[in-house]
Image: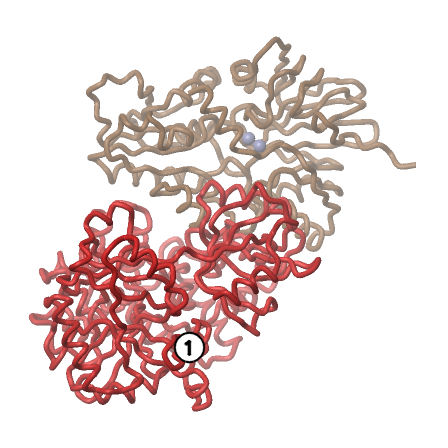
Chain colours: A red, B brown
Amino acid sequence: MKAFGRLYQRLDSTTSINLKVEALVQYFEETPPRDAAWGLNLLLGKRQRRMVTSRMLRDAFLRSFPDFPEWLLEESYGHVGDTGETVSLLLASRGICPNESQHSVSLSSWMEDRISKLSGKEDQQRAEKIFEWWSRLSVDECYLLNKLLTGGLRVGVSQKLVVRALSKWSGISEAELTHRLMGEFEPSEENFQRLLSEGGGKKVPSQPYPFFLASPLEENDWKSLDFNHLQLEYKWDGIRAQLIFREGEVFLWSRGEDLITNQFPEIVEAASNLPQGTVLDGELLCWNEDQPLPFSFLQKRLGRKKVSSKLLESHPCILLAYDCLEANGEDLREHSLKERREILEKLIQDCDEPRLKISSCLSADSKESLEILRNSSRDFGAEGLMLKKKESPYLSGRKRGHWWKYKVDPLTLDAVLIYAQAGSGRRANLFTDYTFALWKDSELVTFAKAYSGLDQKEIEELDRWIRQNTRERFGPVRSVEPFHVFEIAFEGISESNRHKSGIAVRFPRILRWRKDKVVSEADTLMNARKLLEAA
Amino acid sequence: MTQKPLLSLDSSGLGCESGRFHVDPWRPVDQAVITHGHADHARSGSKAYFCAEGSGDILRQRLSGDFQLTEVPYRKKFKLGKTWVSFHPAGHVLGSAQVRVEGLQSVWVVSGDYKRNADPTCEGFEEVPCDVFISEATFAMPVYHWKEGIEVVKDLQRWWSAEPNHPSILFCYAFGKAQRVLAELSKLTDRTVYLHGAIETLMPAYRNRNVSFVPNQTVSSVERGHAFAGDLILAPPSAHRSAWMKRFKNPQTAFASGWMQIRGARRRRGYERGFVLSDHADWSGLVRSILASQAKTVYLTHGQTEVLSRFLMEEHGLDVKPLKTHFGDEQIEEQFAESVS
Ligand SMILES: [Zn+2]
Ligand SMILES: [Zn+2]
């Protein structure tokens, strides 16, 4: 863990890309593969198992220091915004950590033999074990350990930089490594060596291709658009997914590289009628006859271990395919979109499965007709248009000049700030998580949470105001004087019985701080319902 | 009938009626007793100023207009109105003092800003027993815990010497922090450190008090061709992202402040590196000093007063009240540095 701790400190203390890559290369060079596998896993932010909750970690601290008031720990947490960091700072002030770590245990052994053995332990036993570790690690390592325990470690490097360093060290191209790293990566010596071996070893059937992403259409993109060579589609408001059918098995990957196969049994069933060696790119949507249902329907299907047959019936899903990346086991990504589209059309037609549809092409021959299409896209349950060059290959990541997204203008409402909470990560100890409300008669009803949209100066100004105008505290959350009005933009609006307001909005964000408006001028819930009916 | 307190807030600040003076007033008054020269504590416009020995040069330099200034050695009692007043070291910056006020019924101490860690540029904090203690509470959260200055400056020197090819720029407050760094560095190296003009203006006051520093000179006195590769430069935070920075090619930057204790704050400031170095007391320094004052009543100013209040009341049974002052706005000090740079 010492080596990884050193790497973490080096990455954390510079913004220079070169220095970061240099530190990474040195780490891979000096670290035995079994540890490097774990290091890589953490660097990539691949799903980490959470061995203890933040609450348990705080509990372990309180059990270790019974004289420390619980409320003071909560206040400290509210100030810092991160449990792992709060606890490590408090440990530092307690002086129980040695200056130099007294542990020479390797990262892999920490992960495999120690941390993973915590689950199932009684509270007291767990606390004792954690305390024993704390008292032998340096403060910086305690921070790292706390983050490993709670599964929330974020290292300040992008996947891109990690891949660049791996490539520099191994000599394998970045594109190849990006592909090899897609999907699940079980941190083991064997997998790490295979990742870097000649030919990358045999690909496992589940391995997805990196997603190709569209860029937002900007003003000066117009001149490079040639309507004769563009494929137009709706931009759907579902979940981007990659469907794989290889060696008799179906895999469904989300864009965040989560395997979501089990959550969509009807798609799995349908996909097994495709020919072997097929990979499709498309959108998962809840569907009714010939229209998508609002995103809130799809949401019901997410994050479940098992989908009941009742839910399958009430919330039926389809995959709306728009690209074909592999057919008959052949990688088609170098082929033009035009060719891929032809193959896709034939595949979907031959398969003849109502759960596998194709995203139809639209046509426009001018900017004006394109605008008309865009403005009507909400009527078809879409959130705008996709513009793709017919000769475009299927690249990876966001590369400009091939695919564009042209979204409809967001819906907006003016709402009142009523709660604030400290953010996390780089925004810890600033109030950046806001809750907004709308009027219902003379009452303010919570309607949306938003985290983004203000610039740094506004965030700091608002933070100061929140501290001075706090009404009540509930742990890290503060209620504030209803005073400031913000214009909130969102992509979609739907009924919801989970929210007190009876409505749920998608992707809410702050459009602007309406300093020109007083609280009484904020929108009412009635206004929100009008948008709902229009949608 | 309740006794009128010896000190209380009025529109000009913390006033002492029977002594006919204010401590660190934010509006012009007849007699101002000043704890130290930071811009949020020492404001222009009053007729007469009293300060501790060591603070005079700074005040003369920073205050504008006509005024009378009396410098009094630490611990020497002098009479103002019906009270006896004396200055006691606060360990914050050069010439910083706690103000002890002795009335007929009680003794009050106004801490001003203070710290408990060693600082070679000023005399260490003195624990002064009193009935009522008015303490700052800038870093009043238990997560704030300082290492000794020399340890932090050792880290700083490691950071500096690891970059031989580019300039290393450390941002820090021009009055106090910069000199503390220069004084600690003199124990570790004799390489020249370069200073922003706003820091240089304060150096003569320190030289007059015989504080020893690492060799230093202003950036502007260096000939044009010098690239500052591998050099350390000290500048106030206001110089960050200003035109002044153009002179330095691909510098690595750091900020020295207590706020750097928290990762989020570090990232937000946009510096690559944060050194946790503060001239204010950390949590344990605050608690220790407040308890050592033996005061039964404590007022808290500057920053996070609520948490410390509750802690002192619940854990130590003290009577604690917040005091709304205009101190603790480091932005004022920053703007001041800007105006003289
Ligand atoms: Zn000060
Ligand atoms: Zn102050």
What amino acid is labelled 1 in the image?
A: Gly
Q: Is residue A17 left or right of residue A531?
A: left
Query: As displayed, is residue A120 above or below residue B145?
Result: below
Q: Is residue B191 left or right of residue B61?
A: left
Disc 1 target residue: A303
Quick one: which residue is furthest to the top in this view? B66
Q: Residue at x 61, y 15 (%)?
A: B71
Query: As displayed, is residue A169 above or below residue B75?
Result: below
Q: Residue at x 83, y 27 (%)?
A: B104
How many numbered dots are placed on residues in this image? 1
| Residue A91 visible in the current orientation | no
Tell me the chain of label 1.
A
Quick one: which residue is furthest to the right in this view? B1
Q: Quadrant of the N terminus of chain B?
A: top right
Q: Position of residue B317 (x, y in %)?
A: 74, 51
Q: Position of residue A253 (x, y in %)?
A: 28, 75
Q: Residue at x 24, y 35 (%)?
A: B250
At mark 1, the secondary structure is loop
Q: Position of residue B335 (x, y in %)?
A: 49, 27
Q: Locate residue B34: give its quadrant.
A: top right
Q: Position of residue B141 (x, y in %)?
A: 56, 49
- The foreground one among B206 and B225 is B225
Q: Quadrant of the C terminus of chain B?
A: top left
